[in-house]
Amino acid sequence: MTRSRIDWRDLLFGLFLVAVAAGTLVATRNLNVGHAADMGAGYMPRVVSLALLAFGLFFCARSFWRAGLLRARPVQAMLPIEPVQLRPLLAVLGAVGVFALTAEKLGLAIASVVTVILASYATREGRLRETVPFALLLSGAAVLLFIKVLALPVPVWPR
Amino acid sequence: MDLFDNLLLGLSTALELNNLGLCLLGVLIGTAIGVLPGIGPIPTVALLLPFTFGLSPPGAMIMLAGIFYGAQYGGSTTAILVNVPGETSSVVTCLDGHEMAKQGKAGTALAIAAIASFFAGTMATVVIALLSVPLSVLALKFTAVEYFSLLVLGLIAAVVLAHGSVAKSLAMVLLGLLLGLVGIDVSSGAARMTFGIPELSDGLDFVPIAMGLFGLGEIIANLERPAERRVVSQKVRDLIPSRVDLRAAFPAVLRGTALGSVLGVLPGGGAALPPFSSYALEKKLAKDPSRFGKGAIEGVAGPEAANNAGAQTSFIPLLTLGIPANALMALMIGALMMQGIQPGPQIMTEQPKLVWGVIASMWVGNLMLLVINLPLIGLWVSMLKIPYRLLFPAIVLFCCIGTYGIANNLFNVWLMLGCAGIGYFFIKIGVEPAPLLLGLVLGPQLEENFRRAMLLSDGNFAVFLSRPISAILLGVTAVMLLAMLSPTILRSRKVALAEES
């Protein structure tokens, strides 16, 4: 296996920080910055995002620099990033998204069933014969616990 | 004497009927999640936060604290019986605890773990009570300047002493601070980074962020690993340890308690450091170190005591100074703020009922754990038989409903969805998300105190160094950061923390 020439972990984190910092600087460009004795609303966001920018650039630079060092002296191989598996990622995020889309419109009972069934697709082990009754059971429990006992103001059935 | 008055006040609060009930509920939930691998105390506390609104402040804190130390307790049960550490803190208990179980001494190991935990919990309660009085006297001298320096020290120390890259953790703290700035600026009324979304004007809720980063992100990453099969078939007998066992375990319990109490106070120490250090110490002190790993009773007693003592003394910085020692304590601060209590050095004098009630409840809770846990072991073990494929959809659902419950709107669910994606990204690139939570919770206070200090000093930054307490606090911070640059310390830190992970 060829060793990567770049420390991807550092690089990705660095780019992420640079993006966040740049986004913040743009989003807060119109806020009054003021000065130390009389800070405006924009003072802290500016200071923090500039620091983040510095960190981000540092990690980006280090990702190349460190890779060079390791190539010269490959005592400790860089940890590669394990490949992303889409199935669990999409199923879990999708389940949360479906809950957000349905909870207020279709009510907690239906939203819960759909969420649980979709989430269970995250593993290949899920069997519908097992998942569906389990989802119904959980939905019942959720309605009892959150709406009847804890009085969460969300409809049970579609409005 | 003040101390006794305080403890009496605390006991009378903790022994109120509904607080007793909440304490019991907390330790039961805590034990359950401690037993179940894959759910830690952080998402659980985050999940239950929205439902503590209706409780009295002491009741809410008593229950949440119970979850925390209950989880430490439950983790060791599964570590001993099935060699599965329910929590990171009980990884070492697996070594000798499970070995004892294999030799047919599961009952003894469980009992020793329970007794060691109870003893440590009791002693730690006394330590908290003793330490908090002088600390609160010191805290009264604090102004915005000192408090700002203290917050800086707390944040930096939590980063330096926790595991993971220091530079990355510092960046994460800043990221958390930035997220904490979202919302209407209190002093000018200007909207900051709200992007026109009305839900953002009150700032970001930390519950969806914590649940996304710690709960869901973790679940997605767990699902990528192949499922492990666990065989649970253990008969538990002899729950009362023999005199010989007790005599062998007692010195280890004492040392573990002392070590755990000290390490627990340190910010960032978290749950893993005390038991590991105690195990190493016991091994070093033993006449025959080769017994360790083969069912040495000291190897269970010491770490279990250290674990529980550390879990409890990590409340000291929170209850006296309002500084969280780790991500879980940051959630506790959040719980206080939800109750309308401003955490800070004044908390002890303003909320004695709350502080002492929580301290006393820890002792009560530990007693409950001792009494209820051993008879319930069968129940806990049967919980382990729930397969993860059924467990995680349930967690996902409860996370959704829980985040919805914070403000009864769906915005937080979407926020949690985004944070879950980011949390997964962080796990993939090997960045620890805990510092972000610290920054997020402490951010608003940091800004407020910084502004106030600057206003007092007319924009002169030297004020942080000209005041003695503040200068000392910043000095300690600087020494800690500089020490991180020294190669020898860096190396030994790497070794010490590598054992943890």
Image: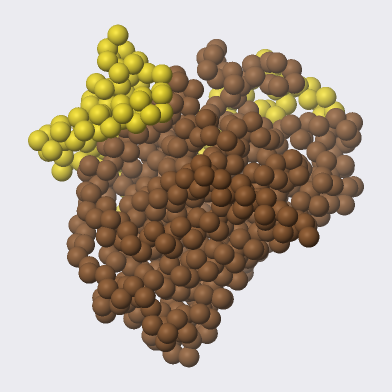
Residue B125 picture quarter: bottom right
Q: Give the chain ID for the brown colour.
A: B
- The N terminus of chain B: image quadrant: bottom right
Q: Residue B444 location in percent, x, y?
A: 67, 32
Q: Is residue B166 left or right of residue B112?
A: right
- Residue B287 versus residue B274 in the image, above or below: below
Write the residue at 59% across / 21% down. B202
Q: Which hue belongs to chain A?
A: yellow
In the image shown, does B3 or B207 lie closer to the viewer? B3
Write the residue at 40% across / 41% down. B215
Residue B316, can we see it? yes
- Residue B38 versus residue A13 in the image, above or below: below
Q: Residue B127 location in percent, x, y?
A: 65, 63
- The C terminus of chain B: image quadrant: bottom left
Write the residue at 22% across / 69% down. B235
Residue B421 picture quarter: top left
- Residue B298 versus residue B439 in the image, above or below: below
Q: Residue A110 location in percent, x, y?
A: 24, 21
Q: Residue B211 location in percent, x, y?
A: 43, 37
In the image shown, does B396 or B175 lie closer to the viewer? B396
Write the residue at 41% across / 19% down. A153
